[in-house]
Image (cartoon, grey):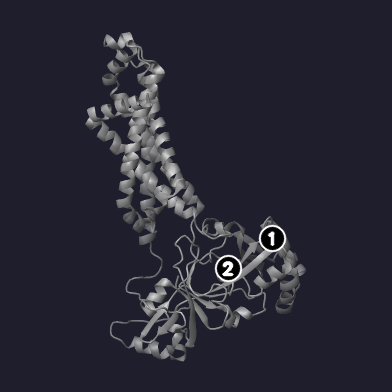
Amino acid sequence: MFRNYLNVAIRNILKHKFFSFINIIGMTIGITACLLIVIYINDELSFDRFHAHADRIYQVDLHGRIAGQEINTANTCPPMAQALVADLPEVEAATRLRALYGMSVKNEDKIFTEENVFFADSNFFQFFSFKLLMGDAQTALLEPNSVVVTEDIAKKYFDSNSPVGKLLVIGNENKTYKVTGVAENPPFNSHFRFNMLISASGDDGMRSSVWVNNFLYTYYRLRPNTSAKEVDAKFLGIVEKYVGPEIERFLQTTLKELRAKGDNYGFYSTALTDIHLHATVSDGLSPGGNISYIYFFAAIGVFIITIACINFMNLATARSASRAKEVGLRKTLGSLRSQMVVQFLAESTLYSLVAVAFALAACYFVLPKFNLLAGKTLTMAVVATPEFIGGLVALVIVVGLVAGSYPAFYLTSFNAVEVLKGKVRAGMKSKGIRSTLVVFQFGLSIFLIIFTLVVYQQISFMQNVQLGMDKNNVLVIRGTDRLGANKEAFRNSLSQQQGIEKTSYTNNVF
């Protein structure tokens, strides 16, 4: 029976080539746009989920108010990690990262300025699931003046030779570090990406015992069957025990007096898998995303696929007269309405299957351009995952059933006698449904057009708005902090160059 439905559906598609072409192209465009949105959303939702214990890892954030000044930061103090493990039985392990910006790196005649350089604790590779290709994960960051580099950095400084055991000169003080490991390039769906990890045991700052000096990132891993809420509840005791005495010493006031004035100081946990889309701080290791965009893009995807389905319905009912005699003849010969309904649904599902196949091919060619637009490095690899394949099968079935539902039930409702006499009337109910579909389709289309225009105008405004300064012909030279006492001499030398009007220093560039 199913084979018969399939054969009839294929014959109808081949018989009406132009109609089939329009239907398939319309559905292909809609499904392609929907698939691109799904791939984008899947990437956004996958951030940091590749870690083995991602569901038990949390970042410690700081929120406070001192002298009326709000403090809301992902930065914490050096002794936090040790205190978490020692004082809270819920915490299984903790690790820290300290970001270093614009570090000079030298190997023989190769000298570059590197970003994404961090001081990291020795348990970094046991805590996170970044892969170490060369070296021992247990000891790679144990000794002072040791460094782990990524594949890209290894090729950059050592070509195809093994870098393990080789030396790199890093930083303004020209310290020499031994390469003790090579890590796989971190995936793009990580909330932080590193090029080099330097052993924290050689950094004086990370050995500090001051609790009110916050300049690094602290992560902890819960023990199984424990909750971050239990840790958050005990942060108050941590503050009382360690932060309170320092506030009293530095600010000449107690925590109780501080809180009486409306000020406060406290820590809270943010799940590792929430950092990218649900972060409550703006100074994390990456700019992060926004969950609102995910909801909005998902809604746009639903709108687009809905428009494609309605378009199929309208085209199918528009040629109902040509299919009416087929329905009437089959009813006369004894076909049941349920059988014809299945036939029409099978036909629309076949359209959907062909459209999905074309949409996958279109995604393959469009994805590089989409990556440029979205600032991503998305690939078609996600298509091969069982979850995505299951989603595609569901998409074929749902789109086929939704798109074919109205034509199936509408066309099979014709009276056989009237059809054979050439008297096909849709009736008020059918006309009303079809009019509603057309109005709804146009409404969604108009909404998407207006939304696109508004977004375009907002982007154009951000690119062209006057910020109170002339950005044209302004050049930024990074790394000048390494000049030390020679900064002024360098600036004076620049000022004397022809074509340079003014020079200035700043401690940061946003």
Residue 208 x %, y %:
64, 80
Height in image: 433 above or below 265? above
Question: If the image is split into quadrants, where does the C terminus sit?
Answer: bottom left
Residue 92 x %, y %:
67, 65
- Residue position marked by numbered label 1 in the rendering: 232
Residue 22 x %, y %:
26, 34
Amino acid type shown at disc 1:
Asp
Residue at x 72%, y 68% (from the top left corner): 239
Give neighbour class at mark 1: few <14, some 14-19, many 20+ (Cα, 10 Å). some
Q: From mark 1 to mark 2, how far is it between C-alphas?
A: 24 Å
Give neighbour class at mark 2: few <14, some 14-19, many 20+ (Cα, 10 Å). few
Mark 1, secondary structure of its residue? helix
Residue at x 38%, y 32% (from the top left corner): 400
Residue 199 x %, y %:
55, 78
- Residue position marked by numbered label 2 in the rendering: 126
Q: How many marks?
A: 2
